[in-house]
């Protein structure tokens, strides 16, 4: 892919080749038309913006996502309809052509989890040729993550019989290892140069920091995609993503009301950590373990006293606020204050499930309780937790709770598709953030592009 800004002085033949590669049937004639004295374009650069960028609209894109729960890396191959924002358009807004997911290599996952905690790498025992300081571990993991992501992309391409040259870009979010919006920074770990080199496809990454540069939280970014793909003029829709962290997007029926979106609290992050600590399982399949336990009401109220829940939006959170160490500290304090209460590990899992359900539903009810036509659509790994879905419905009596499959996209692939869409927005020079969601003072084009 060629950057249009770098070819303003390209000669006629080279430009013809460029336009031919970007799908124009008669490039020589097109160039003559675009650069003639009768053209409406003031410069060649203006002309290129009307040709090359248009070809980025409906090509193939790959989206990648590895969330806070670190349960694996998802990759999707998709194609967007250029008229997806046109309500009268009868074509589907997006076609999901292929998907692939792979668990993290155990050592990489261990290091990533350690990096997510301040000074967490101090607990790592370096193996041969491995680093010993936090900054060196960051560099090691950034490279290892990129090599792993490249393998995932190449497997996706191979399984779908897709030529890398037909893919316009990969949208790779990287792995968030520190998110400090109150300090004005966020760190996503990935070396996009390696992915571009190993796959032969341009990579868009580093999506969050441009939003933070204009006063935003840098998160959540997915609501802009939710609006583009799922908004409905006849009903209020709430998208609830249950990944490591839970976040909502409120899509009002009226275009005069702004889209709202923010993090509501922990989800799979704590559920997975607690079950992994007490069983051989890495997640609570269907919520069966939680359902076998009994809610510890005083503990739930103690956990809900975390300052994050009382904050007004826009707001975002992560492992910095909610993690296993925090939970164990809360349990220790609970036991000291409630020596007469006994409980099991399954009871804690039931309480953590209720914490996710009630913290999310409390926020959702602020927007749908008076609406006569509203629905909640759940995506992320938590959508597969039947018990959690049941608890959500119990706390949301004014609307139906469904998974995003009912909107045409399986819940496990929504976020990966979102970053394919965000990569497309970047290449088209279109904004990717929603200021009303992130708190930014304006909409901006997100991401850094590493050209293949």
Image (spheres, rainbow, N blue to C red):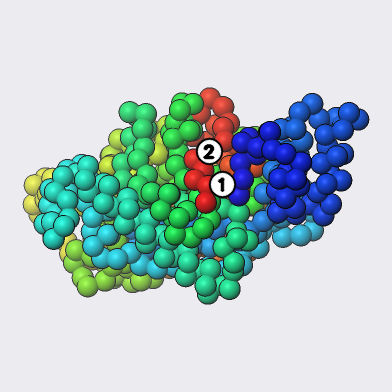
Q: Residue 104 carries which label?
A: none
Residue depicted at x 8% and y 47%:
336
Residue to which mark 1 is pinned: 422
Q: Residues within 10 Å of mark 2 (few under 14, many from 20)?
A: many
Direction from residue 328 to residue 451 in the image, left or right: right
Q: Position of residue 120 (x, y in %)?
A: 18, 47
SS at mark 2 in the image: loop
**Do the CB atoms of the residues marked 1 and 2 lie less than 8 Å apart?**
yes
Residue 17, given in percent of the width and then of the height, sits at: 72, 50
Viewer-closest of 71 and 328: 71
Q: Is residue 199 left or right of residue 61?
A: left
Q: Is residue 290 visible?
A: no
The location of residue 287, given as percent across then percent down, is: 35, 68
Is 15 situated above or below 229?
above
Q: Position of residue 405 (x, y in %)?
A: 58, 65
Relative side of 132 to 250, left or right: left
Vertically, is 261 above or below 300? above
Cα separation between marks 1 and 2:
8 Å
Q: How many marks?
A: 2
| Residue on which the image places disc 2 | 446
- On the image, which quarter does residue 433 sit in? top right
Q: Can residue 44 be seen in the rendering of this structure? A: yes
- Specify the quadrant of the image occupied by residue 89: bottom right
């Amino acid at each position: 892919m060629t950057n249009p800004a770098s070819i303003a002085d390209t000669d006629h033949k080279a430009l013809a080749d460029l336009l031919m590669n970007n799908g124009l049937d008669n490039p020589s004639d097109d160039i003559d038309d675009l650069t003639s004295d009768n053209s409406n374009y003031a410069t060649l650069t203006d002309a290129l913006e009307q040709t090359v960028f248009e070809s980025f609209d409906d090509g193939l894109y790959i989206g990648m996502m590895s969330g806070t729960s670190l349960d694996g890396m998802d990759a999707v191959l998709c194609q967007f309809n250029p008229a997806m924002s046109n309500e009268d358009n009868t074509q589907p807004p997006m076609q999901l052509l292929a998907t692939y997911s792979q668990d993290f290599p155990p050592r990489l996952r261990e290091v990533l989890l350690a990096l997510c905690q301040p000074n967490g790498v101090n607990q790592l025992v370096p193996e041969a040729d491995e680093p010993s300081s936090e900054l060196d571990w960051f560099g090691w993991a950034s490279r290892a993550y990129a090599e792993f992501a490249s393998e995932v992309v190449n497997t996706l391409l191979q399984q779908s019989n897709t030529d890398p040259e037909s893919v316009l870009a990969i949208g790779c979010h990287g792995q968030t290892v520190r998110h400090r919006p109150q300090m004005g920074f966020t760190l996503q770990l990935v070396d996009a140069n390696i992915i571009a080199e190993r796959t032969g496809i341009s990579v868009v990454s580093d999506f969050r920091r441009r939003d933070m540069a204009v006063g935003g939280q840098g998160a959540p970014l997915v609501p802009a995609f939710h609006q583009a793909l799922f908004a409905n003029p006849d009903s209020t829709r709430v998208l609830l993503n249950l990944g490591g962290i839970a976040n909502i997007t409120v899509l009002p029926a009226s275009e005069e009301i702004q889209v709202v979106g923010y993090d509501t609290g922990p989800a799979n992050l704590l559920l997975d950590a607690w079950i992994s600590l007490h069983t051989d399982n890495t997640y609570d399949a269907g919520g069966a373990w939680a359902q076998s336990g009994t809610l510890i009401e005083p503990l739930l109220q103690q956990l809900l006293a975390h300052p994050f829940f009382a904050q007004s939006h826009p707001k975002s959170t992560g492992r910095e606020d909610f993690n296993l160490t925090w939970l164990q500290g809360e349990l220790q304090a609970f036991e000291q204050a409630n020596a007469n209460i006994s409980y099991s590990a399954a009871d804690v899992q039931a309480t953590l499930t209720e914490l996710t359900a009630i913290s999310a539903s409390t926020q959702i009810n602020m927007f749908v309780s008076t609406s006569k036509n509203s629905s909640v659509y759940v995506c992320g790994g938590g959508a597969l937790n039947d018990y959690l879905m049941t608890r959500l419905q119990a706390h949301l009596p004014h609307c139906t709770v469904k998974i995003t499959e009912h909107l045409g996209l399986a819940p496990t692939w929504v976020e990966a598709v979102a970053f394919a869409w965000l990569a497309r927005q970047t290449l088209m020079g279109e904004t990717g953030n929603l200021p009303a969601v992130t708190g930014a003072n304006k909409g901006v084009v997100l991401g850094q592009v590493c050209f293949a």
